[in-house]
Image (spheres, grey):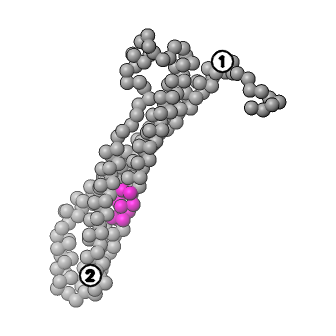
Amino acid sequence: MDYWHPKQEPTPDERRAFEKARLDYCSGLYSKEMQRKELLEKKAQFYLSLVTLFIGALFLRLDFLKSLQAIIAQQPVPHSLVWTVYASVPAVGIAILVALIAILQAIAIQQYLDPAPSQIVDELFSPTATCEDELGLFEETALMYAIALESNRKVNNKKARWVKIASYSAIGAVVCLAILLGTSSYLFIYF
């Protein structure tokens, strides 16, 4: 409080405008956080599709791995190429497994709060309702939005960490698969 400019109490119209602005602000932030949730879930679904594609490709092409093993067993292949093949196969598998676990963790996180009261009739229309006027309704609703926003942001942050792990694992799987395919192509061509 400044000595030269003492703080004045807001008028009822100013108070109403402030509570309405706070409600609009909290409601807008809540909507953005729910959009973030949708985006994270779409990313998780994309990575799940990618991992499913990898798993399907690997299981449909097991004969490729058998023929690669036969070339390595029959021909004198440099140890660096053998090591690259034997290291990249489990690396692809581990990367796919980590990506799958991370995706399932991201999808499983669903503890979101709704700003609407669970018992709306009791909250708004019973004689013991805490909101008695428009100002109280604005204030209480903004508070519910703020509580839901903070909780949902924490949930989305957890979900985002799992989606990030899934993305890095999927990239790792692509890199390892590219190394495996490049090495095996070299072996099939030159050996």
| Amino acid, disc 2 | Val
According to the picture, the residue beneath numbered tag 2 turns out to be 82
Q: Quadrant of the N terminus?
A: top right
| Amino acid, disc 1 | Asp
* Residue 30 as seen in the image, left or right of residue 90: right
Is label 2 or label 1 in front?
A: 1
Q: Position of residue 58 (x, y in %)?
A: 23, 64
Instruction: State which tag comes first along the sequence, 2 or 1.
Output: 1
- Residue in the picture at 33% in, 69% down: 176
Work out which residue is located at the far top of the displayed protein and give it.
127
According to the picture, the residue beneath numbered tag 1 turns out to be 13
Work out which residue is located at the far right of the displayed protein and give it.
4
Q: Nearer the viewer, residue 106 or 143?
A: 143
- Residue in the picture at 28% in, 65% down: 94
Mark pair 2, 1: CA separation? 79 Å
Image height of 37 relative to 173, above or below: above
- Residue in the picture at 17% in, 83% down: 73
Q: Is residue 166 magenta?
A: yes
Q: Main secondary structure of the magenta part?
A: helix
Q: Nearer the viewer, residue 61 or 176?
A: 176
Q: Quadrant location of residue 117?
A: top left
Q: Nearer the viewer, residue 109 or 59?
A: 109
Give the number of the disc on residue 45.
none
Q: Position of residue 23 (x, y in %)?
A: 55, 27
Mark 1 is surrounded, within 10 Å at the Cα level, by few (under 14), some (14 to 19) or many (20 or more) other residues, namely few
The magenta segment: 165-174
Q: Is residue 47 magenta?
A: no
Q: Is residue 169 visible?
A: yes
Q: Position of residue 55 (x, y in %)?
A: 24, 59
Mark 2 is surrounded, within 10 Å at the Cα level, by few (under 14), some (14 to 19) or many (20 or more) other residues, namely some
Image height of 69 relative to 29, above or below: below
Q: Quadrant location of residue 17?
A: top right
